[in-house]
Image (cartoon, helix red, strand yellow):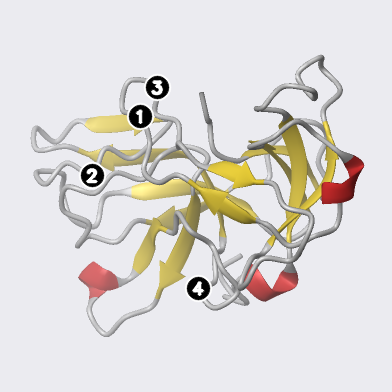
């Protein structure tokens, strides 16, 4: 089962430690969830409702991302503060009260499920991701990496290795990746 991107090493941080950024979630995302492990883009718009992060499930070099969602907090219709590993996107959530915790893309290594048995020939090529949205029961993104031994058009995910956990020869290895600079937003927020 795919789980999206998981930060495994961040610049200046040890394995699975902090370094996350808290950003507002767009208020106009009525009925749209953002899942843990999914890339997010930051929009600055003329209206407050359209300013903030939203899901960017197919990151490309012309659709810049700021990071990977690792959790969220929001206020529901009953004025209860909610915390979750994903943002539920409920239409009755209070506007201006939803925030996502994001692992910045720059200088971060992520783990993501691959689409084929690992081979060193995949290292260094620009790859695309497959899948979209996620699973509400787990809160995880359904995104995985489409492994290819050639640069994909507009692709921004670069395999740099594999976790040697006995899973590398299966059709779903745990691949270590970085994002290419062309796919990372230069937003001053991160």
Q: Name the residue under label 3.
A: 138
Q: Name the residue under label 2.
A: 89
Distance between mark 4 and mark 3 Cα atoms: 27 Å
Determine the residue positioned at 22% across, 57% down: 29
Secondary structure of the residue carrying tag 2 is: loop
Residue 82 percent across, percent down from the top left: 29, 31
Question: Distance from label 3 to label 1 (Cα)?
Answer: 6 Å
Pick whichever of labels 4 and 1 is earlier in the sequence.
Answer: 4
Of mark 3 and mark 2, the one earlier in the sequence is 2
* Labels 3 & 1 near each other (Cβ < 8 A): yes
The secondary element bearing badge 3 is classed as loop
As displayed, is residue 189 above or below residue 106?
A: below
- Residues 133 and 47: in front is 133
Q: Do the CB atoms of the residues marked 3 and 2 lie less than 8 Å apart? A: no
Q: Distance between the residues labelled 4 and 1?
A: 24 Å
* Residue under pointer 1: 135
Q: Distance between the residues labelled 2 and 4?
A: 22 Å
Instruction: Please give left or right for residue 13 compared with residue 105 in the image.
Output: right
Mark 3 Cα shell of 10 Å, populated few (<14), some (14-19), many (≥20):
few
Q: Which of marks 2 and 4 is nearer the N terminus?
A: 4
Residue 14 lies in quadrant: top right
- Horizontal side of 118 relative to 132 (left or right) equals right
SS for dot 1: loop
Above or below — where is 147 with respect to 58? above
Residue behind mark 4 = 63
């Amino acid at each position: 089962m795919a789980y999206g991107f998981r930060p495994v090493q961040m610049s200046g941080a040890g394995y699975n430690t902090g370094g996350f950024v808290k950003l507002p979630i767009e208020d106009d995302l009525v009925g749209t969830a953002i899942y843990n492990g999914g890339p997010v883009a930051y929009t600055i718009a003329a209206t407050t409702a359209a300013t903030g992060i939203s899901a960017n499930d197919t990151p490309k070099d012309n659709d810049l991302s700021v990071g990977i969602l690792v959790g969220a907090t929001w206020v529901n219709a009953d004025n209860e503060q909610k915390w979750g590993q994903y943002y539920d996107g409920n239409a009755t959530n209070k506007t201006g009260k939803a925030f996502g915790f994001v692992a910045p893309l720059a200088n971060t290594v992520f783990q993501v499920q691959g689409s084929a048995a690992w081979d060193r020939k995949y290292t260094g090529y620009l790859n695309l991701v497959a899948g979209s949205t996620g699973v509400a029961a787990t809160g995880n993104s359904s995104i995985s990496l489409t492994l290819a031994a050639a640069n994909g058009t507009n692709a921004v995910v670069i395999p740099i290795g594999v976790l040697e956990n006995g899973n590398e020869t299966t059709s779903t290895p745990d691949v270590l990746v970085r994002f290419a600079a062309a796919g990372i937003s230069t937003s001053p927020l991160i």
